[in-house]
Image (cartoon, grey):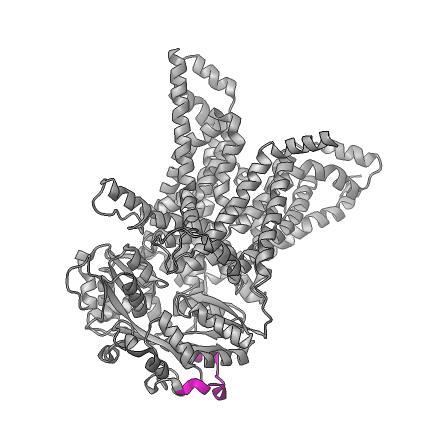
Amino acid sequence: MKKKQVVSILLTFVLMVGGLTACGSSNSNTASKGSLNIYVWTEYVPDSVIQNFENETGIKVNVSTYSTNEDMLAKVKSEKSGTFDIVQPSDYMVEQMIGQGMLQKLDQSAMTNKKNIGSAFLNRSYDPNNQYSMPYLGGVAAIAVNTSKIKNNITSYGDLFNPKYKNTMVALDDYRAVIGMAARSMGMSMNETNDAKLAKIKAQTLKLKDNIKVYDSDSPKSELISGDCTLGYCWNAEIALAMQENPAIKIVYPKEGAYEFLDNWCITKGAKNAANANKFINYMMKVETAKAVSEESPYLQPNKAAVALLGDKYKNNKAENIPEDVIKNGEFLKNLDTATLAKYNAIWTELKK
Amino acid sequence: MIKQRFRSNAGPALVMIGPVVLWLAFFVAIPLIYVLVMSFCGIDKNYNVIFRFTMGNYRRMFDIDYVEIYGQSILIAFFSTVICLVLGYPFSFLIARTFRSKKTILYMMVIIPFWTNSLIRLYGWRTFLGTNGLLNKLLLTLHITSEPIQFLFNRSATILGMAYVLFPFMVLPLYTAIEKLDQAQLEASADLGAHFRSTFLHIMLPQTASGIFSGCIMVFIPCLGYFFVSDILGGGNADVIGNLIQRQFQSGNNWPLGAALSIILIVITLLLVKLYQKCGGDMQSLGV
Amino acid sequence: MCRQTKEKCAHNAGAVYCGLIYAFLFLPIVVIVINSFNATNTKPYLTWKGFTLDWYGKLFQNSALLDSFQNTIFIAVTSTLLSTFIGTLAAVGMYKYKFRGKNIIDGLLYIPVVIPEIVLGISLLTLFTNTNIPRGLLSLVLAHTTFCIPFVIFNIRARLDGYDKSIEEAFMDLGANRLTTFLRITLPVLAPGIGGGALLAFTLSIDDVIVSYFTNGLTMTFPLKVMESIKSGVSPDVNALSTLILLATMVIVILTQSNLLKNLRKVLKRQS
């Protein structure tokens, strides 16, 4: 008796489930002209933009997501080369990947929309002639304050270390970001390699232990909106989005100068769909696309033609259109040697235990 | 005669056992040996594994930070196991004995939740226990508390999650063991005027010990590795050994160190299993 | 008299206790079901914006989600079949024949059962990376089959413990060959063990997170899709799909457990 039960449970389950998927999958196969595998940050490229690209070109886009540059590097390295066509590394990671021979040159003739990009965002030191990368969005890691709960005036990264804010904070789950922030709060660089300085940075970082309630790189706005956290160290756009949901949340740019980044589109070496990838990158630099991106993902928009279209609503929003002095005072991450990174990792382990 | 018999058996034996041997060799033995080898290697400046012998990974693992995380893991695993056992034993007894007439359906009701994805159930807990979650709203409206209670993102939340996810692994062996208890013996003991406590201590406990042991092992060991529970409910504040390993294979980009940590985890596991066998535990009952 | 009320009391207390445990087990599921009706459209989908059934429709337009679910089912079915096939042969073979190295096989079988999944996950990741086995459905099926095989074998073994070898011998003495004996005698006796093992393999496979996490490449399974959506707030359509899965399993269990089917069959028989 029991065996019949088991077998019938199995069979019915498989059948029902098969039926369920069969009716859904019929509409997923649009006539496709090739495909494209992109590997991007979580919550960064709007679904609608990708759908429009698919509709316009007939190319099927498969999206995978990651949470930190280092995660992406690890995954790309462990997969067969050419698994991902497009990746989205930040500045220093572009340099790292070029150095490791993981990227291929872009087809410059396909980049007809490059003209839309502001000159300040091109020819950066990590890729001097933009041979390998085109900018997507930039930003800083700023401070979010829920003013209905936190009455003190917060102006700097240093304020985040105040023991008063015990168990209130959401921080990026990213070791370079958090340790770098601790370094900046003491007036040091995010890229220190000196042991004596690192010891000081370590002591400072560990002071955050009691204050950080959650580590979340993917969607720190969730904890801010849900009220689980009243203080945040996170990407400016996440704060901008949280502010839309809860007006009590404010953005603060640290007076020490913020951690700054610029993310880029790159094509991996051995990419199977390189032509489609070039098409995609150029599509992302189109004015309309960039405008649509900024509406859902309010970071610093390098596409100056799109910025003109976005109008005052974007220009006057301090959380989205980052003030120029903040940009000027910011610091970018640099590649460090593996021995130093191991020390950073050790600090991180101690913080998170 | 014996020889002939052996020869005639060699063919079918090979057909039947060959596939599993090949499979285990290729997908279990070789990868594990490779992990062991890798744990003695280093990385170059591009994070690639280089095969040069070093004890560096093992030295690093005795850093106080790492040792504290092992301790924390074991603590989390211990409390999760205790919770499962304390909640699970009377429960298993009730569904296997007291409500015997409905036992199949009661037993199935333990299994049903586990056909819904475990991550989404953990997320369900997270929405329920959040600062503005249902539970806090309830407590606030009932004036039990004036400020929302911070349930989430700490060790207790992680322990709750582990206990929740692994609860059926405790109930299954307990249920089997309790079901086998001799009803006549239990009744005789009660009729003889024995207190429930002594019936429990002298009859039930010894006879269900194997179930208890295998339940504990099946809850304790996975707790050490379930990194997603501490990610979702611990918020990154209650890491277990699994988180350490996962990090080395991802953002840390240090596979040899991750491999060495895995070896430590294997060693801890084997020690526990040895202990389990010493206590008279049956290996077979771990898999069923 | 006194004793009876006491017993009744204990009985009721027991019922209440069980109720609490079930509440503990089902509470997050209730949250999932409620959230699948939430009309909110903004991430992270936490605030209640009213009741809607829309997500059950939208679910069928979310091709990425449905694809992942399809992959999960495909992987579960394939690896269940594979592991059941290999496991059944092995269990019977190991029971019947004595040979050197049996202990080693036994030891290897316990490894995937006992060691934390993450170790299996990373060791398979290193294997696939070094042998260039493409990551995707293939690697997932291989990985899932690996951790399913031991469970199948152990389930069948439990059944073999009470197995009488002499029937088989008698059958063969009557002139049947090995294959017929296996199919006609051995297999039917072991069927419950095989079925139980297959069910367990299937259950383990559909809910696997950790091993899949390290071996998936670009292929998403349903648990991995959930993991990804947790990053930015689980959207109600994921909750809707989970609710449907739950509903399906409940229906199956109720159908198989109740005597509904049996009675139906009786009625039909009587009519014909």
Q: Is residue A79 visible?
A: yes
The image shows residue A241 at horizontal and vertical percentages of 31, 66
Vertical placement of A101 versus A4: above or below? below
Q: Between residue A193 and residue C89, name the one nearer to us.
A: C89
Q: Is residue A211 left or right of residue B250?
A: left
Front residue of this view, candidates B155 and C173: B155
Q: Is residue A36 magenta?
A: no
The residue drawn where x is 17% and y is 56% is: A164
Read off the magenta span. A98-115
Residue at image position (48%, 48%) is C243
- Where residue C193 sits in the image (x, y, percent)? 63, 39
Q: Is residue A114 magenta?
A: yes
State the residue in front, A190 or C37.
C37
Q: Position of residue A278 (x, y in %)?
A: 50, 81
Q: Residue drawn at (50%, 56%), measured in percent from left and top? A: C57
The image position of residue B16, as x and y in percent, is 70, 47
